[in-house]
Image (cartoon, grey):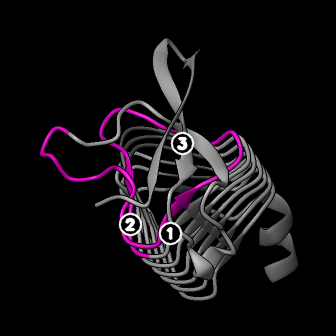
């Protein structure tokens, strides 16, 4: 059983035909009432037969979930967010704004991905992590704990941002747990 049905409205997004959803039951955790129009999906069910959106999860506004992307538990995607290929948003995680998630992506825990952030390839954002601004996370990177990524920062190639680490500006975290400091940060630390 799913908590949503299709409205009959369709459009093409990124070359994929998607269909607008409508809640068929109340979702009190999100303040959604039966009849509320939601986001866009490429199919109601995934190839394995499971629902694309399950439990108390919701896809709102003009957010799109396509490919094998899915939402479960109490997850939420809204705004113009795009979940493409094999994205899994679970637990109490939120994806919003113009965030673009494409590839084998996991967003879980109480994580937030918003504004114009991109998660590409294989990436994990979990626990209480925040990825926003124009931040880019890709190539087996992990963002966890209370890490906060913003600005135009990049986390890539098996790098990990964790704990209470704050990565901003044009900083690059590349392939090791050691933060590559900007020239300003190096001089300030000296």
Marks 1 & 2, CB-CB < 8 Å contact: yes
| Quadrant location, the N terminus | bottom left
Q: Is residue 158 above or below residue 164?
A: above
Looking at the rendered structure, which numbered label has been put on residue 75? 1
65 with respect to 86 (left or right): right
Magenta extent:
47-73
Helix, strand or loop at disc 2? loop
Query: Any magenta on residue 101?
Result: no
Ranked by sequence position, the earlier of labels 3 and 1 is 3
Residue 70 spot, x, y in % from top left: 37, 52
Q: Nearer the viewer, residue 172 or 33?
A: 33
Residue wearing tag 3 = 21
Q: Nearer the viewer, residue 90 or 180?
A: 90
Residue 58 magenta: yes
Distance, label 1 to label 2, CA atoms, is: 6 Å
Q: Is residue 113 left or right of residue 189?
A: left
């Amino acid at each position: 059983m799913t908590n949503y049905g299709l409205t009959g409205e369709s459009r093409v997004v990124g070359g994929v035909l998607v269909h607008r959803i409508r809640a068929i039951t109340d979702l009190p955790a999100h303040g959604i009432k039966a009849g509320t129009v939601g986001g866009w999906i490429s199919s109601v069910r995934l190839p394995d037969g499971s629902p694309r959106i399950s439990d108390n999860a919701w896809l709102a506004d003009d957010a799109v979930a396509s490919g094998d992307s899915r939402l479960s538990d109490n997850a939420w995607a809204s705004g113009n967010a795009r979940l493409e290929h094999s994205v899994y948003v679970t637990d109490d995680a939120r994806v919003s704004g113009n965030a673009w998630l494409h590839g084998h992506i996991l967003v879980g825990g109480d994580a937030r991905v918003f504004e114009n952030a991109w998660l590409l390839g294989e990436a994990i954002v979990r626990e209480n992590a925040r990825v926003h601004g124009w931040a880019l996370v890709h190539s087996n990177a992990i963002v966890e704990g209370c890490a906060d990524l913003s600005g135009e920062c990049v986390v890539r190639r098996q790098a990990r941002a964790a704990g209470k680490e704050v990565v901003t500006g044009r900083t690059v975290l590349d392939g090791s747990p050691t933060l590559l400091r900007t020239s300003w940060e190096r001089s300030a630390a000296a």
